[in-house]
Amino acid sequence: MKFKTPFVLSLLSLFSIGESAAHGINGHVHVTGWAVESLPDGDLRSFFASSRLRDIAQIGASFPDSGYAIGDGYGEIAHWEPFIQGYLSWLIERHGPDFASDEAQAHLAFLMGAASHGLQDEIFDSTFLYATEQHDGRGQDETDPGTDAFLFTDGHLSFLPPVYLPAADLVEVFQTRQGHEVSEDTLAAGMARVHFFVLESWPAIAPTQDAKFRAAIPWAAAHYMDPDVTGSLRSEVPATLGYLEALFMRVHGRFSMSDLVRHVYPSQGRRLSANDPALVESFITVVLGQGCRVGSANTDTVKLLDEAGLEVPLTVTHTRWTTRADDFSRLIQLRPAVELRPDAEYEIHLLPGLELQDGRVLDVELVEHLRSACEPDAEGCTPYFGAGPNDPVRRAYPPEPPQMDRPDARADAGAGDRDGGVSALDVPSASADVVTPNLEPSPRSSVGGGCTTSLGLPSLSFAWLAVPLSFAWLAVPLSFAWLAVPLSFAWLAVPLLALLFARRARRPRSTIR
């Protein structure tokens, strides 16, 4: 999104990747993958029974940031609901109503991945990023690359989807639905850069980034996977799942007004963690199944009522970076202007008048419930108020889904090797037929020691090249002095070249059409 600051600028400028995501690209791939694995039984889970379609959804979740990698505006456009609605309508016209062909299903999986990326950015930036600024005094420059690095060094990464890109069709979608001209070559180059430098090469880069950022953002490092913290990567999974379900209903013409609210933070069964309106933790965030026009979300259409049915004074806002009344946001955020009563129930009311992305206007009243935080040190008060320890709302996800057959694509890269090679999502439950998505951090060794990989080590055997390459510019005649700068930094490419040769034999095959 255009608000974004450089992602590890000193690193990615070397890769010619400019701006980056609101959280790291590996985070997008994995939150989307985890959401797909957590789907309940039904049509959408059956749709994703194909490992190919799961891979396409994951690589689709990296697509919006590929525009920044190549310096083209398609990346900014792809983050937002107007593009998603345009792509969705194109897909319906071209392949509906049954979407039975392999091509149609691949498009739908790619669309859902790209859409999930945009939603996750909206959630992360409008919640967790505020909290990081509040607790650590740092912002996107640290949190974006830091959380991606933590994912690797804490043993959470397992997905490495091959490149898939329906380039010719996307050129048409951008031109006809958004009025943006982009070439197939530009799209392919952007995706290739993101896939190699940010996904494939991340095991060689992450330990250095972890060492740089973990100490700078200790609160974020401790809570980026905490399901009780709004906007953490783990907390994004059920919201992403709900949005995927909404997209599937939208493309099949089954989306009704009662389906609009897909998730509420604090998540069902969880309390607010603060009642003080000065704290980010008092924000209430509603996730929608499609964008709503920012100008239509106001105190006339959004209310917060206390137990007596009285309105709570509040500010109604939206995604952090939407600034115009005609922008569309997948979030509505309620910020109480007064301190809420401890351990009390409140109701969120969305009233008729909200204008939606598909042109419809909300014509029913929607009500959601939440509970405020307890008094500090209140005895017996927990973040939960569900029915008991086995209540699904106490878990990070909906009830555990049947295990989907997927290889651990990161195993060859060294991620997920701790604890006997069991990846973070492959911990068996009591039943042999189900898997509990357990994302608790693995025991963490010192960075560099416990995280060395088959990708990182080969670069050392080429280290001797660094010395002659770093002085190569001295041999450049004055008439070619402009070559001095790139040659003086040529040694920086040595680890990447070694990485390329080390991975070439097992690099996933690209599918670009």
Image (tube, rainbow, N blue to C red):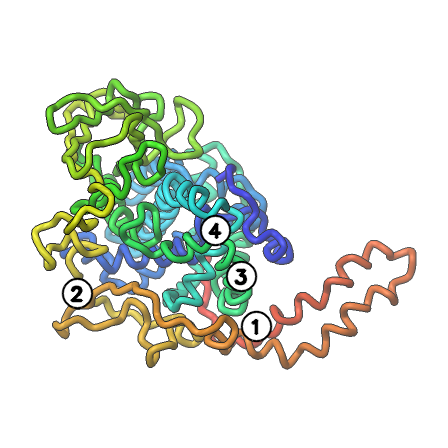
User: Closer to the camera, 62 or 414?
Assistant: 414
Q: Which residue is labeled 3 in the image?
A: 209
Query: Within 10 Å of the Cα at label 1, are there few (<14), some (14-19), or many (20+) other Cα atoms?
Result: many
Camera sees residue 339? yes
Q: Amino acid at mark 3?
A: Gln
Label at residue 144: 4
Q: Which residue does the numbered mark 1 point to in the structure image? A: 499
Q: Earlier in the sequence, mark 1 or mark 3?
A: 3
Residue contact at pointers 2 and 3, CB within 8 angstroms:
no
Badge 4: residue crowd in 10 Å (few <14, some 14–19, many ≥20): many
Question: Label 4 sits on what residue type?
Answer: Asp
Tag 3 or tag 4, which sits nearer the N-term?
A: 4
Q: Say which of 237 and 446 sits in front.
A: 446
Q: Are marks 2 and 1 in contact (CB under 8 Å)?
A: no
Locate residue 399, reporting x and y percent. 15, 57
> At x 55% / y 65%, what residue is drawn?
208
The one nearer the camera, 303 or 185, is 303
Residue type marked 2: Pro
Label 1, label 3: how far apart the Cα atoms are:
17 Å
Measuring from the top left, give residue 7's x and y in whole percent. Answer: 54, 50
Q: Mark 2 to mark 1: distance in Å?
A: 36 Å
